[in-house]
Amino acid sequence: MTVFLVGAGPGDPGLMTVRARELIAAADVVLYDRLIPPGALDDAREDAELVYVGKIGGGPQMPQEEIDRLLVQYGTGDRTVVRLKGGDPFVFGRGGEEAQVLRAAGIPFEIVPAVTSGIAAPAYAGIPVTHREHASGVAFVTGHEDGSIDWDALARFPGTLVFYMGVKALPRIAERLQAGGRSAGEPVAVVERGTLPGQKTVVSTLASVVEDAAGIRAPAITLVGPVAALRSEIAWLEERPLFGKTVAVTRARAQASALAGRLRALGATTVEAPAIRTQPLEVSLPDVSSYDLLCVTSPAGAEYLFTHLRDARDLAGVTVAAIGPGTARELRARGVEPDVVPERAVAEGLVEALADRSFDRVLIARAREGRDVLPDALRERGAVVDVVALYETVAEPLGDEARAAAAKSDYLLFTSGSSVRFFAEAGGSLTGPKLVSIGPATSDVLREHGVEPDLEADPHTPDGLIAALLADA
């Protein structure tokens, strides 16, 4: 089989290549570094073997020789092996050396390039590494001095210098470049955790950078050259509306990831602390075609409903009502255009939306713990109502790390009453962060736990949650 030397990019999961994600999802074995993006392994198969081979500067190290041995060991079999590296495998990633080891062992390999941090970190800081008026070239240099760097030649290089792994070497870099002829006033930028939450940028000069960047920690990129001064004009990351805010999301993991992604796009640092998950129930679904109206009360309900149907044809002739836009999207994804979607994404809103319509037989597809507002209201109007519980919401274990991170966040988001209950039962704190509720029913459960929501979404949807955050931030 083949060993794939795969670059995972500079840190932002959104900068991983499609090819990298495809290979991770297909791999039998993944040998992965420490500096890979958050969630990079989420798509790995459940039966895949995940082997950590990371290195920490100044800390525990797996010798490169041991990594080489593991590559040969796993690559010799009939399994698909991914060697997942932070950044690009051929830019200070020792990918060339590992490729040589594989070639010597007669093991087929492929290289999957990636966005390197030496370009991405400055870009996220608003600094181009080249510019027609300021730099016609760029040199990438390792900050680990082994005596091979010609500092005088480097100082004379007519362009931008980008140093990897140069935090500890910053005093030497500044000293040697000035000694080689670079001006003491030459702009310098140091970018910590480039493209990641908590990115920090310091702009200084060669004369002052050691003092100004004293608080910077690895991993960091150091950039020297006139382009560093352009940050004052074109910095963009800090302009995003939720930059500097941390938001903890407690909904089920499948939905939390999508919401967290939208929040990150707005500049927020996100903490995924799912307190709940859904699981299907054994149920015999009635003949849906025998009903006048089908009400689907959640996106999960739409998903589980179609595990009992052939496809959208089974709903032909039935009026379909979705409780909100998220549920409507799930239905549309399966070829069903809902006939009724209320303005307010709560049971009361659906009751109002159906007020002027008459139905004889109604089927409500929902969670086991759903409220009875909708079925009770339709029965009062004379309909025969059957309720089928397709799934249940259960507690998701909350790890110590996620619990602690949620407690330190600026906002704590709840999208259901069950997420409040299970989060509290798991030891999650309801004090400290601002509490954000998706709607009245969730707010009521927060009050049952002795706290008042600071923000309530209107409309009662993920879009409404985001709007509430933007208005408050």
Image: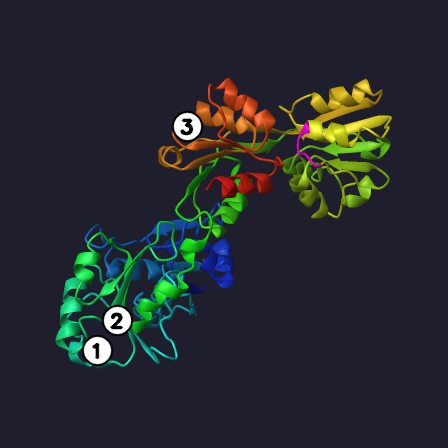
The magenta span reads: 343-347
292 vs 49: above or below: above
Determine the residue positioned at 28% across, 56% down.
Answer: 219
Residue 299 x, y percent position in the rendering: 64, 38
Of residues 107 and 215, the one drawn nearer to the viewer in this rendering = 215
Residue ID at (48%, 62%): 17
The amino acid type, in three-letter code, at marker 1 is Leu
At mark 1, the secondary structure is: helix
Q: Which residue is mark 2?
A: 141
Query: As rendered, which of 139 and 392 lies closer to the eye?
Result: 139
Q: Earlier in the sequence, mark 2 or mark 1?
A: 2
Residue 79: image tag: none
User: Going from the N terminus, do you reach mark 1 or mark 3 first?
Assistant: 1
- Number of the label disc, if any, that sits on residue 428: 3
- Image disc number at residue 154: 1
The local secondary structure at tag 3 comes to loop
